[in-house]
Image (cartoon, helix red, strand yellow):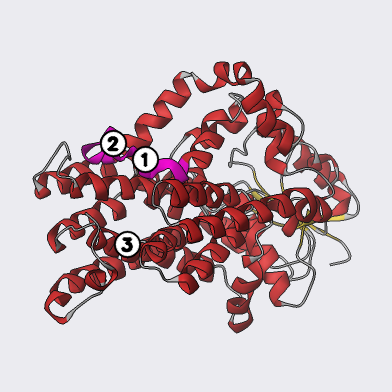
């Protein structure tokens, strides 16, 4: 049974429960920040997506148009994430990508705060609240989303949880701020807000709050997909290509989901989707019961977007918890767990076993092992790459390996190596290639051939070469 708003507020005799919560948030934020910074310093960040966002935010902070040279259009044409303009205020203090890592780690850790109060509001005791917080902080998607570059939708986790809390506490102002923040992180999150509104109206009986969420989500979805994104990108929403089997536009896809459901069967019922669901649910399976799954309704749009993504290899990241695509599902999965515990219906009732369960799945599914299996083996060219990066002029237009791009993205023109632009070398002032780094979809033979071409091009000269790392500059530099 839900407590009254007054009972949910922290009182003096309950403050003992907030101390470990504060420590858990602080320790978690610090660890996640240090881990993401370490990955970046090991040159394991990527042009897609960190380079894209870092370049755009830097340009905004410098008063320039945030035109992404990596995508070929204005950053608002990507996902309509206007929150970049707020983040750019931090870059005005000092322009560094570590701001993004700090924001992301703090946002993920702070998700524990509204989760704590939602658990308190549901009638759980402080020790149960702490177990829920630990289950959230050890949930593999949280760690993996933090590890994989930076994505603004990660900041929607605490905002979505706070929106639910605000609706239950009748805090209209806080609810509005939370919804606006969610919508500013990514246009696709408007679907989550719409589903949240429906859930608030029909299941939570918070009709005013539900109507607000439904109206704001619908309005932003229509504006972003029909006007904002096409105006700044010159094309349909980028993610539409992932659902081409359903139609050629956002609204055609939505229509066919309902009118021609047979189209989705081949994609929906697949081994990849079954595997994805198991990865998503097993870490919290101890707290999942059928009656409480109604709390997962706001997560349905994000879940369907992942399950319905085409089965082509390039779209499989949506069906893997390594990436950020499952982020909008997280707060509502935790909400299911909270209410299962409140109903006394969890499969496992012993709190220490729940924590051990969470820890086991964290160790098995969180990608902390990448530092050993994936990142360390590529450190053999780290020193040479750092030396080459230091020789790249600040304003030069650069073509570079994907993992080098976010190291030098504070410029108007930066592009990652692809098979297409390898034939367009004259468009760049500098070309920085790592012959030992296997770019996705680019044979090493192609890289070797382009290096030979650059050595023979009179307008370029070899500026640096060591351990398979090559830096070519135009003679005018």
Residue hosting label 2? 291
Q: Residue at x 44, y 46 (%)?
A: 202
12 left or right of 207 in image: left
Q: Residue at x 60, y 20 (%)?
A: 261
Determine whether label 3 and label 2 are within 8 Å by CB.
Answer: no
Element type where label 1 sits in the image:
helix
Residue hosting label 3? 112
Where is residue 26? Give x, y as percent: 30, 70
| Region in magenta | 284-299
Indicate whether 265 appears above or below 428.
above
Which residue is situated farthest in the right direction here?
458
Element type where label 2 sits in the image:
helix
Mark sitting earlier along the chain (3/2):
3
Q: Which mark is residue 248?
A: none
Spatial separation of the CA atoms under disc 3 and disc 1: 21 Å
432 left or right of 147 in image: right
Q: Nearer the viewer, residue 39 or 90?
A: 90
Spatial separation of the CA atoms under disc 2 and disc 1: 7 Å
Determine whether label 2 and label 1 are within 8 Å by CB.
Answer: yes
Where is residue 308? Give x, y as percent: 57, 29
Where is residue 161? Give x, y as percent: 40, 59
Q: Which mark is residue 294?
A: 1
Where is residue 227? Give x, y as percent: 80, 53
Q: Residue at x 64, y 42 (%)?
A: 435
Indicate whether 448 appears above or below 4.
above
């Amino acid at each position: 049974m839900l407590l009254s708003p007054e009972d949910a507020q922290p009182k003096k005799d309950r403050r003992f429960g907030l101390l470990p919560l504060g420590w858990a948030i602080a320790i978690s934020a610090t660890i996640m920040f240090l881990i993401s910074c370490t990955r970046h310093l090991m040159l394991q960040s990527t042009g897609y997506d960190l380079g894209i966002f870092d370049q755009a935010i830097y340009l905004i902070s410098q008063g320039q148009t945030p035109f992404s040279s990596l995508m070929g259009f204005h950053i608002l044409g990507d996902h309509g994430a206007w929150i970049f303009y707020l983040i750019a205020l931090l870059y005005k203090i000092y322009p560094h990508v570590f701001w993004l890592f700090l924001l992301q780690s703090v946002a993920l850790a702070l998700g524990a705060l509204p989760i704590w109060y939602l658990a308190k509001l549901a009638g759980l005791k402080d020790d149960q609240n702490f177990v829920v917080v630990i289950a959230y902080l050890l949930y593999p998607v949280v760690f993996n989303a933090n590890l994989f570059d930076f994505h603004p939708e990660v900041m929607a986790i605490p905002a979505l949880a706070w929106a639910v809390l605000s609706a239950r506490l009748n805090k209209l102002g806080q609810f509005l701020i939370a919804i606006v923040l969610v919508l500013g992180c990514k246009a696709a999150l408007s679907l989550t807000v719409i589903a949240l509104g429906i859930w608030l109206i029909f299941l939570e009986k918070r009709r005013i709050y539900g109507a607000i969420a439904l109206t704001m989500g619908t309005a932003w979805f229509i504006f972003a997909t029909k006007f904002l994104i096409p105006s700044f990108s010159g094309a349909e929403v980028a993610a539409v290509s992932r659902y081409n089997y359903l139609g050629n536009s956002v609204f055609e896809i939505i229509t066919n989901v309902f009118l021609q459901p047979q189209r989705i069967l081949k994609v929906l019922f697949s081994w990849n989707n079954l595997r994805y669901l198991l990865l998503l649910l097993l870490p919290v399976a101890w707290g999942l019961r059928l009656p409480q799954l109604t709390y997962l309704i706001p997560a349905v749009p994000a879940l369907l977007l992942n399950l319905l993504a085409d089965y082509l290899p390039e779209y499989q990241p949506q069906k893997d918890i390594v990436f950020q695509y499952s982020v909008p599902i997280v707060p509502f999965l935790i909400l299911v767990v909270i209410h299962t515990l409140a109903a006394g219906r969890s499969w496992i009732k012993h709190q220490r076993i729940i924590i051990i369960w969470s820890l086991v799945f964290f160790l098995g599914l969180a990608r902390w092992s990448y530092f050993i299996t994936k990142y360390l083996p590529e450190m053999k060219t780290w020193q040479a790459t750092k030396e080459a990066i230091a020789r790249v002029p600040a304003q030069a237009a650069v073509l570079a390996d994907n993992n080098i791009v976010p190291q030098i993205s504070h410029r108007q023109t930066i592009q990652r190596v692809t098979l297409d632009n390898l034939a367009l070398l004259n468009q760049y002032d500098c070309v920085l290639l790592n012959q030992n780094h296997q770019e996705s979809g680019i044979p090493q033979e192609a890289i070797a051939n382009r290096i030979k071409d650059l050595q023979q091009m009179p307008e370029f000269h070899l500026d640096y070469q060591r351990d398979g790392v090559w830096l070519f500059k135009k003679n005018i530099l």
